[in-house]
Image (spheres, coloured by chain):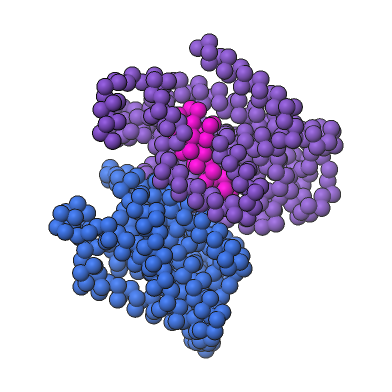
Amino acid sequence: MDFMVFQYPMITVQACLDGILLGVLFALIAYGMALQWGVMNIINIAQGDLVILGGYIAYFMYLYGIHPAWGVIVSPFIMYFVGVGIYKLVINKVVDRDLFISILATFGISILFMQLMNFAFGADVVLANSGYGTTFLFDSNVVLPNSKIFSAVVSIAFAICLVIYMKKSKLGRAIRATAQNARAAKILGVDTEKVYAATFGINAALCGVAGALISITFTIHPYMGLPYTIRSFMIVIVAGLGNLPGVAMSGMGLGVFEEFADYILGTEFRIGSVFLLLVLILVYRRFKLSRKREYLK
Amino acid sequence: MNKNLILYASILVFGLAAPFIFPAFKVQLSILCVLIILAVTWNIQGGEMGYNSFGNILFYGLGMYLCASVQVGMFFPLAEWTESGGEKTFVHTPTQFFQGMAAGLVVAAVVPTIVAGLIGYSILGLRGHYFAICTLGLGVAAGEISGGIEIIGAGQGFTTPPFPNVGGLEARGEFFYFCSFFALVLAFITIRAIYSTRFKLILNAIRDNEDKAEAMGIETMKYKIIGWMVSAFFCGLAGGIMGGLVGYIDSTDVAFDGREMGVFMVLMAILGGKGTLWGPIIGATVFHIFKEGFWTFFLGWQYVALGVLIVVIVIYFPEGIMGWLREKYPERFGEVVDEADRKAQVELK
């Protein structure tokens, strides 16, 4: 336990800013999670592994001498097809089944991806160096890498584009209609199978963007997927499905929480504290719901 | 009934004789016993109660750490033991080892049961996938947190006391085999006994419709917690034995190994057929044989195979081996089948 973070205001500011910039990324991943959860009623445990895979695409561009920031454009394209492929192979067989079946199936996909990435890219912690330099604020007391600011700006831009796309485009309307009532949408001529595939693809593409940004700002490793899944799940249950400002706010809140947990408990408890927070939130939710005597099925 | 008795007696005799018939496979047989315990106890939640838990690994890992800590801590300072890593300056005498192991196993079984009782009220109130994800988080959190605690070895792991020098490697294998086999027998007898009472019907009522079960006047929460405590008891016991057998405890790779054991127990129960008494046992046996074969011949690709296996089983084989047998030979399961109805169904297909 180390409460230094509260004794020096500059460290507090630093932790808050770091957390907010990190949280924007979490919110982007969580938005994808909320999308597929709302539309297809699937909780994708492999979400984090899609993020890491997207990160490796950017990392490989960096290895071949292309600036990794271009990964933000390239990796969603590749990831879209990866997502559609996963949908065609596995998800479409579990989409109308029990939720646990889909959790377990995506858990299998997650283990598969984790191991394949371990074979393909090695078990080292890697980072794509963007060379963006750093910004110093408040007499150099607060240090912000420009790559973090870049990643936050890009994720906000992508999120806004996606929201507009969902509102205006034909596919976006079809997706929203399917989320509201799949059967009615089918009757009115929406090809729900295609909508599901596109939703899963868009989710994977979002993961690709987030992964590319994570590979620039933080580090990636084949086994780091599960925490991202858990973070996005947590953000979605705190914010609720289809509550976009809520997703953004709780994403940033989670980022700040993590930074403070990092300072106070030490880095080795960072991931543990995220998982514990999930348990606490779920338990809190359970007592809140049971007081109201209403259960979510 | 008589036929059953002969069956059980022959299994018991085979189990007792197995380490002497297959002396080379003693360790594998002990691991098989532990796997069966985990699958059968998972089935209480996942199969009978409809609460799909990823978190029973929590009790397994807890039991593993507790057993080893008690075994060391009873005679030597624990902190110095873990600090020295593999280079031990303390040696257990045979008496100390067995006393420590016995006390350790008792603690390893009892403490997880208490923990399950304490957290049960909060966790078991969650429904469906919220429960699944919450227990998944619990298991991973326990692994991450125990990886940061110095006194139990933190990141560098915890070497359990080596087997004392009585009878060498053979005696070690036999000792751990009989430990795990008796734990398995105990687990089987307990679970069979509680399945033959009203308890199982209540669990099934919870699985089928919890709100209605509550409306019928069943205190569902009480039974859910009891079911979880039974699971925790045997998971802790299995973990304690497994810790001694493996000889080395790492927080995320051995004890709270959600990626291996945590998934294995779910997979074994589903493979065998959840919601049946024998399903998880058959599933665990088949799975263990498959796993060992794969682990030996395709080393390195085992997790890829595991991932594919999970997806295939879940999608194409969700009813498991017992479910398939039941569909094929319904008469054996005491179901009356109308022959004409069956023919009509076949024709419909």
Q: Residue at x 72, y 44 (%)?
A: B247
- What secondary structure prevails in the magenta region? helix
Q: Give the percent coordinates (x, y) of residue B3.
A: 53, 13
Magenta span covers which residues? B257-283
In this orientation, which residue lies closer to the viewer: B206 or B39? B39
Chain A colour?
A: blue
Q: Give the percent coordinates (x, y) of residue B340.
A: 26, 22
Q: Give the percent coordinates (x, y) of residue B91.
A: 84, 43
For this orientation, the residue located farthest to the front is B347
Chain B colour?
A: purple
Q: Residue at x 66, y 23 (%)?
A: B14
Residue B197 appears left or right of A293: right
Q: Residue at x 60, y 38 (%)?
A: B289
**Residue A25 falls in which quadrant of the image?**
bottom left
For this orientation, the residue located farthest to the top is B2
In this orientation, which residue lies closer to the viewer: B224 or B27? B27
Q: Residue at x 37, y 44 (%)?
A: B128
Position of B9 relative to A152 (above/below):
above
Position of A268 relative to B118 (above/below):
below
Q: Is residue B299 magenta?
A: no
Q: Is residue B263 magenta?
A: yes
In this orientation, which residue lies closer to the viewer: B178 or B2? B2
**Residue B281 falls in which quadrant of the image?**
top right
**Residue B169 falls in which quadrant of the image?**
top right
In this orientation, which residue lies closer to the viewer: B325 or B11? B325
Residue B214 appears left or right of A221: left
